């Protein structure tokens, strides 16, 4: 009887030992598998963490996009888009099917990639066209070397920022007349929408309250001789729905600000001089349109209108020789009543 009990106990012990062994093996397998999955997970999110992305956000991002790992530079850029606007980023990825397509695609066909339009803020929309229009008015001598050099630089800038050639109107020399400027403004007002941007650059002689453009011998009500008053011109600008960036480098250009800043659509008005001082050619624009990352004060990879103005102002502000051996202080001006200059960009 004792032997039988002993055999039973032995069997029970063997069975128990086997069960324990099996459990231990299963636990080891689960632990090993868990460790392996964790290692894969950490390896996946490592590029995001090394790029300075918060771990909590990286984990949430990986939950959605782990099937498209490993995460390269395109994925890191897409992560930034996703963090700013998850809904739009998800929609863009769904349409493109890849990080590269979602970042560099242009689904709204406005020649601006989706990355820029999401990162640039509320004034842009990756799913709605944001076209850019330009009016460049220069009444100076077209044969002068300085004129040619400046406009080569400006044309290069506009091309780099993907302004469509058909959306840029240039009025140079004899074509820089009050009437053609008026008609060009009407032309743009008939096409541009509130989703678009207008860059208007004026290089001309001027005085307090008016531009001294070239003359065609025609008559415009309230227009005296060849002088084109800012008050008169502002009536046509009022009909342009696009967000406006107006650069006026005429002498006494600051006197344009009270008129140019008015309107129901956002505008930033920049002048080389105040309303009581002369100006010099393209002095401000020569710095404003430079393609340099030095302007990127907040290091976000984008250069705003405010950053461009600050850069230009810091380089040209100061004392200059005037007529009759009298010097004057050049103090560039910016009017930003809509508080948009920090988040307004001329292109990518």
Image (cartoon, rainbow, N blue to C red):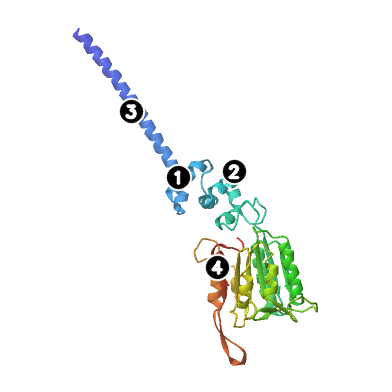
* Vertical placement of residue 88 versus 183, above or below: above
Q: Residue furthest left?
A: 2
- Identify the element where label 3 is drawn: helix
The residue singled out by tag 3 in the image is: 24
- Please name the residue that numbered disc 1 is placed on: 59
Q: Quadrant of the C terminus?
A: bottom right
Q: CA distance from mark 3 to mark 4?
A: 66 Å
User: Who is closer to the viewer here, 82 or 1?
Assistant: 82
Q: Which residue is mark 2?
A: 94
Real-space Cα separation, disc 3 to disc 2, in angstroms: 45 Å
Q: Nearer the viewer, mark 3 or mark 2?
A: 2
- Neighbor class of circle 4 (other Cα within 10 Å; few <14, some 14-19, many 20+) is many
Q: In the depicted view, which residue is nearer to us: 344 or 241?
A: 241
- Looking at the image, tell me whether mark 2 or mark 1 is earlier in sequence order: 1
**Disc with the residue nearer the chain's start (3 vs 4):** 3
Find the distance from the CA under tag 4 to the CA under tag 2: 35 Å
Q: Which tag, 1 or 4, sits closer to the chain's start? A: 1
User: Which one is earlier in the sequence, the residue at label 3 or at label 2?
Assistant: 3
Residue 259 is left or right of residue 301, and the answer is right
Quadrant housing residue 10 = top left
């Amino acid at each position: 009887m004792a032997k039988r009990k002993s055999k039973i106990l032995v069997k029970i012990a063997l069975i128990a030992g086997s069960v324990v062994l099996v459990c231990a093996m299963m636990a080891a397998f689960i632990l090993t598998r868990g460790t392996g999955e964790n290692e894969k997970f950490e390896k996946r999110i490592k590029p995001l963490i090394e790029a300075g992305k918060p771990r909590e956000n990286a984990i949430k991002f990986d939950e959605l996009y782990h099937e498209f790992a490993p995460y390269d530079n395109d994925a890191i850029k897409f992560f930034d888009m996703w963090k700013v606007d998850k809904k739009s980023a998800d929609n863009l990825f769904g349409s493109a099917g890849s990080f590269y397509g979602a970042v560099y695609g242009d689904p709204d066909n406005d020649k601006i990639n989706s990355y820029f339009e999401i990162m640039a803020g509320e004034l842009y929309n990756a799913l709605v066209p944001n076209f850019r229009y330009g009016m460049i008015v220069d009444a100076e001598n077209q044969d002068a070397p300085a004129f040619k050099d400046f406009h080569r630089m400006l044309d290069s800038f506009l091309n780099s920022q993907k302004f469509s050639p058909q959306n840029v109107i240039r009025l140079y020399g004899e074509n820089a007349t009050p009437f053609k400027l008026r008609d060009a403004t009407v032309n743009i007002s008939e096409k541009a929408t509130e989703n678009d941007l207008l860059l208007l650059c004026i290089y001309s002689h001027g005085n307090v309250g008016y531009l001294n453009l070239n003359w065609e011998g025609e008559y415009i009500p309230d227009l005296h001789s060849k002088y084109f008053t800012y008050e008169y011109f502002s009536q046509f600008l009022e009909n342009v729905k696009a967000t406006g960036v107006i650069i006026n480098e005429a002498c006494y250009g600051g006197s344009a600000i009270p008129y140019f800043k008015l309107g129901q659509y956002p505008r930033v008005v920049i002048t080389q001089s105040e309303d009581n001082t002369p100006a010099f050619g393209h002095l401000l624009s020569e710095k404003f349109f430079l393609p340099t990352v030095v302007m990127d004060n907040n290091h976000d990879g984008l250069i705003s209108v405010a950053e461009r103005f600050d850069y230009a102002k810091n380089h040209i502000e100061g004392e200059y020789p005037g007529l009759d051996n009298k010097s004057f202080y050049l103090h560039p001006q910016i009017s930003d009543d809509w508080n948009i200059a920090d988040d307004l960009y001329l292109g990518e």
